[in-house]
Amino acid sequence: GSEAHRRGLIFVSHEDKAFTSGLYAAALKGTPWERRVVQGVKGAHLQVRFIEEAAPHGTHLVVADDNIAEIYVECVSEAFIQQQKKEGIQDHMVRLMSAGFAERPLGDARLGLAEESEVLRFLHAAMSSSKAGRGKLKLFDEAKLVKDALSRLDIDSLPKLSKLLEGDFSGSRQNPDRARLQEALDAVGCKATPYLVVKKLRAQVGLPLPPRKLLVVRRRCRQKSGLGAQAEGGPELAALIRRAGLEMENQGANIWAMCPSKNHYWLHGFGTAIRQRARTTGIYKDHLEKLGLVFGAFFGFRVLHEQRRYTRYGQVKDDVERTLRYWHCDGKVVRFNRYGVVKDRCHLVGKFHAKKGGISAESSAELHKAEATRALTGMLEEFASKHARLAKPGEASSCGLIWKVDKEVGNETEAEAEAEGASRKRKHDAAAENGSESSKQTLKKKHVVGGA
């Protein structure tokens, strides 16, 4: 927006030809960015290192390459997908974030999202001893019923809940505390006894709460839910950056990124799985915390001034190293895989090309390959061998490594995602040519990607 310069800086090498020739100065003259240039730091890896060391501790910063072509978002609306397809748009299952509009995350005007309240987080943690497992309960489960029962007793905060738990719930039904809670539980249809409920709640006191979830709520009851309605509106990218900062804090992570693949079949498949899961469980989760590449073209991180997080094996594989160092420290990286970043000449990303500039400048194919090999083997020998291994000949990998994680949606490398997307396209085209109703139903099922 118009105030972006107040929060942004442009980093440029003092040897950059566009800088030494005066092109930067001419392009920025008379703009708010004219005095927002940091010069003298050569190499993206060293520029990030400078930021990591110089910025105030705890700051959430976003790093973006200067050659980003577009940021894509998978389409929610099937009607919009078909419209783009009729217009001959090749990547018809995604839209440009710069298009100037945003879609509702669930594609339904009747459904919205709201942050889980402190009380409900506490109840989910306390009641999760059921077979469903922690974090897998549906919205209207035992915890939700207990919350509704507590609401009838005017208990809508943790201090009020703590005071309730100080009561005496032993003995017969004539016990006043037990009788009040029993009446409230009966009114909402909860079959749990007051003694069992209080036992579970008391066991949770003093323990950490699980990460806050985004809950699916009907818009008409949103203000009555007491869940703390999530803010909407504003530029989509700004909203994503704000969410990423909150999600890092929520998940105990310190770095986030978008999907390293631009394949529209794959991005849309991930979004479809998110929406199906949200309608089934009542929980909306559009990100992963599993190990996967933090694409260096656009990412954010929390400034911590910890040397163990700084890259030190050059800039050819700095995004791979940064991913592994943050994962090694936190055990989590947050990736929003409905969004994909595309750079200019994207087919050359991570590869040497004499006319490419950037990492390829003042280098050669031999030097580029040697630095990549030295970086990968160096980080594996130093700390990363338990998180990744070198790719074997013939294995799909865009970064030269294979992550040591279970295969699931969002953990594929870019090359694997492209291969999966190509497979989906073949199935899609075959079904379209067939034109039969059975083929359409099969296609509808096969577009759904497995759980995140």
Image: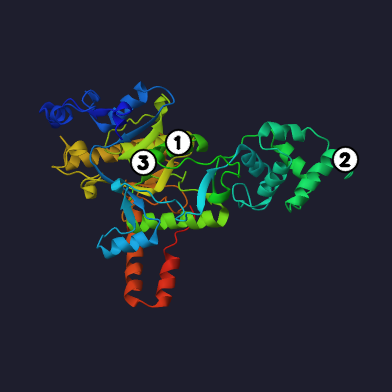
Q: CA distance from mark 1 to mark 3?
A: 33 Å
Reading the chain from its start, which is encountered first: label 1 or label 3?
3
Q: Is 230 situated left or right of 379 in this image?
A: right
Q: Which residue is mark 3?
A: 235
The residue under label 3 is which amino acid type?
Pro
Q: Which residue is mark 2?
A: 175
Are discs 1 and 3 less than 8 Å apart at CB? Answer: no
Q: Position of residue 157 (x, y in %)?
A: 66, 35
Reading the chain from its start, which is encountered first: label 3 or label 2?
2
Mark 3 Cα-neighbour bin, 10 Å: few <14, some 14–19, many ≥20: some
Q: Nearer the viewer, residue 292 or 392?
A: 292
Q: Is 415 situated left or right of 357 in this image?
A: right
Where 240 falls versus 391 (above or below)? above
Which of the two marks, 3 or 2, is nearer to us in this view?
3
Q: Which residue is mark 1?
A: 328
Which of the two marks, 1 or 3, is nearer to us in this view?
3
Q: Is 174 situated left or right of 410 in this image?
A: right
Q: Quadrant of residue 388?
A: top left
Q: Residue at x 68, y 44 (%)?
A: 147
Mark 1 Cα-neighbour bin, 10 Å: few <14, some 14–19, many ≥20: some
